């Protein structure tokens, strides 16, 4: 008590010397000087002039902020929470923002919520949402996307700000590309990942410029019940019948949260944690390329009994010899499968990237296809799904 009394007396004496004005702003340097001498002094000075301390909290140490937060100063607790979040100490941050969140200003709540989104603290955002404390704003919209909430709960203003769309109906195919691809996702992370993939492809189109054009990312919520918990990612495309679709598109990229990537019937299923190399690998499947690792047993039973070149990168040597330079492939268990190169390729290990040889094979397949690629509309028809297409389809031609 004597020490604290001496501190009060010293501060008051120094601030009163020389007929200094009583304005708090004039005293801020002096307040901060004495607060920095010993963190515990910040508490005493806070009692003298809380506005002076609050105005300069960015300059205070963590120890000083803790002293103030223990006095129920919500501004100090907010600053501590931000600092710990920026350092990646999420548990430490939680100790300061959780008890004080309702005392924060609306601006502080919005800023902190945005930080929680940026650091993928979805569990904490869920707690705020369930408690009715998550403020209206970008963070709440991001949380609704993460939860795969219905499209109707997402505002058009937020979608425009984040550069995605809430309906595919008005999308138009481009006549600048051989193939047009609808880009769709059911969750928040998928939007950012697909935009990143699209930008990477735009920077370096494969196998050549004008091969593929990709739409804006379309948020479809949980319409197609995509699931990858048992291995390969799959979706319920029977639900496509309940939607209107833009005509003139060839393929779909559907991005969900988990499951192994695969292509089926002109639809790429891929999760948002997979790399661009995986995306490029799956893109080649659209044009008939086969995997060069062991194919599924069910597929081997029919494909590996064929004869000759059955894919741009797969030759089955049943009663025939492979093309010159082709090497054994692991694709078929009958040991009669051959691939174009002795080296590992993107169709065996995605991280190998696209070689010049496979780029040429891909371009040739687009111009002179061994078989026509399957469009998603054809797959829908195979399933007996009859969605409404909103515009006339355009004819695709494959020639040199």
Image: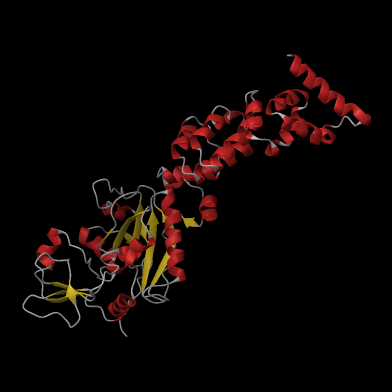
Q: In the visual, does 145 lie left or right of 316?
A: right
- Residue at figure coordinates x 56%, y 43% from the top left: 86
- Residue at figure coordinates x 81%, y 33% from the top left: 30
Total numbered labels: 0
Residue 179, by quadrant, is bottom left
Q: Is residue 107 above or below residue 151?
A: above
Can residue 380 be seen in this snapshot? yes
**Residue ranking furthest to the right:** 19
Q: In the visual, does 126 lie left or right of 242?
A: right
Q: Quadrant of the N terminus?
A: top right
- Residue at figure coordinates x 34%, y 57% from the top left: 254
**Residue ranking furthest to the top:** 1
Q: State the residue in front, 144 or 321.
A: 321
Q: Position of residue 13 (x, y in %)?
A: 86, 24
Q: Quadrant of the C terminus?
A: bottom left
Q: State the residue in front, 185 or 242.
A: 185
Q: State the residue in front, 320 or 377.
A: 320
Q: Is residue 308 above or below residue 265?
A: below
Q: Position of residue 387 (x, y in %)?
A: 30, 58
- Residue at figure coordinates x 24%, y 50% from the top left: 231
Residue 161, by quadrant, is bottom right
Can residue 167 be seen in this snapshot? no
Q: Is residue 104 above or below residue 269?
A: above
Q: Position of residue 199 (x, y in %)?
A: 46, 65
Q: In the visual, does 6 lie left or right of 317?
A: right
**Residue ranking furthest to the bottom:** 400
Residue 204, by quadrant, is bottom left
């Amino acid at each position: 008590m004597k020490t604290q009394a001496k501190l009060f007396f010293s501060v008051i004496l120094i601030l009163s010397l020389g007929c200094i004005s009583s304005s708090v702003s004039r005293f801020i340097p002096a307040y901060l000087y004495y607060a920095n001498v010993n963190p515990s002094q910040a508490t005493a000075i806070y009692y003298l002039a809380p506005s002076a301390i609050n105005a300069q909290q960015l300059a205070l140490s963590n120890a000083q902020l803790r002293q103030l937060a223990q006095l129920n100063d919500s501004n100090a607790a907010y600053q501590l929470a931000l600092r710990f979040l920026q350092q990646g100490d999420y548990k430490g941050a939680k100790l300061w923002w959780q008890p004080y969140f309702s005392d924060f200003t609306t601006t502080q709540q919005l800023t902190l919520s945005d930080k929680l989104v940026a650091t993928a603290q979805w569990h904490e955002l869920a707690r705020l949402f369930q408690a009715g404390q998550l403020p209206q704003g970008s963070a709440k919209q991001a949380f609704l996307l993460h939860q795969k909430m219905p499209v109707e709960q997402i505002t058009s203003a937020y979608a425009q700000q984040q550069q995605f769309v809430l309906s595919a109906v008005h999308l138009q195919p481009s006549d600048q590309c051989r193939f047009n691809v609808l880009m769709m996702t059911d969750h928040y992370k998928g939007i950012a990942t697909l935009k990143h993939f699209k930008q990477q492809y735009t920077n370096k189109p494969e196998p050549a410029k004008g091969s593929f054009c990709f739409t804006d990312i379309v948020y479809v919520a949980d319409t197609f019940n995509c699931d990858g918990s048992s291995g390969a990612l799959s979706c319920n495309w029977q639900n496509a019948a309940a939607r209107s679709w833009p005509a003139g598109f060839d393929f779909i990229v559907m991005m969900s949260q988990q499951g192994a990537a695969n292509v089926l019937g002109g639809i790429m299923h891929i999760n948002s944690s997979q790399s661009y190399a995986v995306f490029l690998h799956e893109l080649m499947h659209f044009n008939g390329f086969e995997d060069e690792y062991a194919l599924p047993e069910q597929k081997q039973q029919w494909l590996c009994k064929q004869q000759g070149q059955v894919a741009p990168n797969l030759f089955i040597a049943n009663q025939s010899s492979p093309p010159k330079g082709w090497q054994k492939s692991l694709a078929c268990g009958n040991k009669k499968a051959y691939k174009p190169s002795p080296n590992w390729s993107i169709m065996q290990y995605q991280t190998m990237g696209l070689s010049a040889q496979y780029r040429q094979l891909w371009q040739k397949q687009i111009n002179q296809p061994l078989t026509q690629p399957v469009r998603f509309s054809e797959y829908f028809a195979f399933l007996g799904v009859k969605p409404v297409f909103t515009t006339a389809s355009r004819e695709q031609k494959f020639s040199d």
